[in-house]
Image (tube, grey):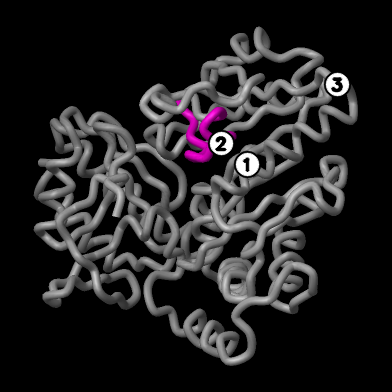
């Protein structure tokens, strides 16, 4: 395999609930959940049964035809969001690529020069060429320039900086309300409302990247709703498939400018991925999982703040729901290796932030298990 990942020396073989097991049978509490993907944990009985049933019917059929799993997942997404239309793809970066195309076409219908897109410094939108062009960080862009033209970068949470960038040729602003890879940095609500107002003023689409923050991760189906926003386009992925590859572009009727042939995908919206998506959405929105996230996330945050009060290593605890960043005053990778040795899996967000993204089904008792290990290493 190409050396594209800084892997830990660990081979994982199976899982159950919030736990995974390596090839020698050692047990680990999974507080990374595949980078916010395994929203229902591992081997979830409802998900497993639904996927087995679908495998017995059809695994793949092209998008020349309708399928019930795809229609059901699309209907649930529209019902429980403030958007009107859905496009299924395979990943977050694909969703962002599609959103960029959608914005460009929207702009071109207004004016031949309305092609500029603004993204925010510290943000992360993916590693394909278009998404990379919207990800203003040298460590990701180095070696791949020239990137796509007409991308402009503004400071996060600085409304004056974005005012200096936006103009009549701007077709979209793309942002995360919580910058995940950037270190779990929250946007200011006043700032977000001001950006939204600027988008209306200049007839630019507001694209919110909810690849990591979406699907119950922050205690609501999408994080934007907690900031009182009405985006034109939302992208999401990760937790929606609970382990199956899926990405989604949602848009309002205003931004619904694609026509046949403008965009497409062979595997997007396949029967297994959309079956999984419907299970996840029903568990969150109809079977009480969202309320569980709200409760257990408060419990986790309170526990972490108590550790911070006793720790000289912790700089800050921040985040929303079950998307938590613990900033420390030393490099984080050695600490993550120590966590792993004690049976806890967590991930990094930058050089000095421990990122906790546990399965949404995590219980208070399991939180206590993870907290005990973190407390031992951070105090």
Q: Is residue 133 magenta?
A: yes
For the point 78% across and 26% down, which residue is it? 204
Residue 198 percent location from the top left of the image: 75, 20
Q: Residues within 10 Å of mark 1 (few under 14, many from 20)?
A: many
Q: Which residues are magenta?
A: 122-134
Q: Residues within 10 Å of mark 2 (few under 14, many from 20)?
A: many
Residue that badge 1 annotates: 97
Q: Are marks 2 and 1 in contact (CB under 8 Å)?
A: yes
369 is higher (above) or lower (below) than 119: below
Q: CA distance from mark 2 to mark 1?
A: 6 Å
Residue that badge 3 annotates: 112
The circle drawn on residue 179 is: none
User: Quarter-wise, where is residue 277 in the image?
Assistant: bottom right
Q: Residues within 10 Å of mark 3 (few under 14, many from 20)?
A: few
The answer to whether residue 110 is left or right of residue 155 is right
Q: Quadrant of the N terminus?
A: bottom left
Residue 190 percent location from the top left of the image: 62, 24
Q: Earlier in the sequence, mark 2 or mark 1?
A: 1
Q: The residue tagged with tag 1: helix, strand or loop?
A: helix
Q: Earlier in the sequence, mark 2 or mark 3?
A: 3
Q: Are marks 3 and 1 in contact (CB under 8 Å)?
A: no
The answer to whether residue 208 is left or right of residue 20 is right
Q: Earlier in the sequence, mark 3 or mark 1?
A: 1
For the point 36% across and 66% down, which residue is it? 362
The circle drawn on residue 131 is: 2
| Residue toward you, 363 or 242 | 242
**Is residue 100 among the parts visible in the rendering?**
yes
Q: Is residue 105 magenta?
A: no
379 is higher (above) or lower (below) than 249: above
Q: The residue tagged with tag 2: helix, strand or loop?
A: helix
Residue 193 percent location from the top left of the image: 68, 27
**Is residue 230 among the parts visible in the rendering?**
no
């Amino acid at each position: 395999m190409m050396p594209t990942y800084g892997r830990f020396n660990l081979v994982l073989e199976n899982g159950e609930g919030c736990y995974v097991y390596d090839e020698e049978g050692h047990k680990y509490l999974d507080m990374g959940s595949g980078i916010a993907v395994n929203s229902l944990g591992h081997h979830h009985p409802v998900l497993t049964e639904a996927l087995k049933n679908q495998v017995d019917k059809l695994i793949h059929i092209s998008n020349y035809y309708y399928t019930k799993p795809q229609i059901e997942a699309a209907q649930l997404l529209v019902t429980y969001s403030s958007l009107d239309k859905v496009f299924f793809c395979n990943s977050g970066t694909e969703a962002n690529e599609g959103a960029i195309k959608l914005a460009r076409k929207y702009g071109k219908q207004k004016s031949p020069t309305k092609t500029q897109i603004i993204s925010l410094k510290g943000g992360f939108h993916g590693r394909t060429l278009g998404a990379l062009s919207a990800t203003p960080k040298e460590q990701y862009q180095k070696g791949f320039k020239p990137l796509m033209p007409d991308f402009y970068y503004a400071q996060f949470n600085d409304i004056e900086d974005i005012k200096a960038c936006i103009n009549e040729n701007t077709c979209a602003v793309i942002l995360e309300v919580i910058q995940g890879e950037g270190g779990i940095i929250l946007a200011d609500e006043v700032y977000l409302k001001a950006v939204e107002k600027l988008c209306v003023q200049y007839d630019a689409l507001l694209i919110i990247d909810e690849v990591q923050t979406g699907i119950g991760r922050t205690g609501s189906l999408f994080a934007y709703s907690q900031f009182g926003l009405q985006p034109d386009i939302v992208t999401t992925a990760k937790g929606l498939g609970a382990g199956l590859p899926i990405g989604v572009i949602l848009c309002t009727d205003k931004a619904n400018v694609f026509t046949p042939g403008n965009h497409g995908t062979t595997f997007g919206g396949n029967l297994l991925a959309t079956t999984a998506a419907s299970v996840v959405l029903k568990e969150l929105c109809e079977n009480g999982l969202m309320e569980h996230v709200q409760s257990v996330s408060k419990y986790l945050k309170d526990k972490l703040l108590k550790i911070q009060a006793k720790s000289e290593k912790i700089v800050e605890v921040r985040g929303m729901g079950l998307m938590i960043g613990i900033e420390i005053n030393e490099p984080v990778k050695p600490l993550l290796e120590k966590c792993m040795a004690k049976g806890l899996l967590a991930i990094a967000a930058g050089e000095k932030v421990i990122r906790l993204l546990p399965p949404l089904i995590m219980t208070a008792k399991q939180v206590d298990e993870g907290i005990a290990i973190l407390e031992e290493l951070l105090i």
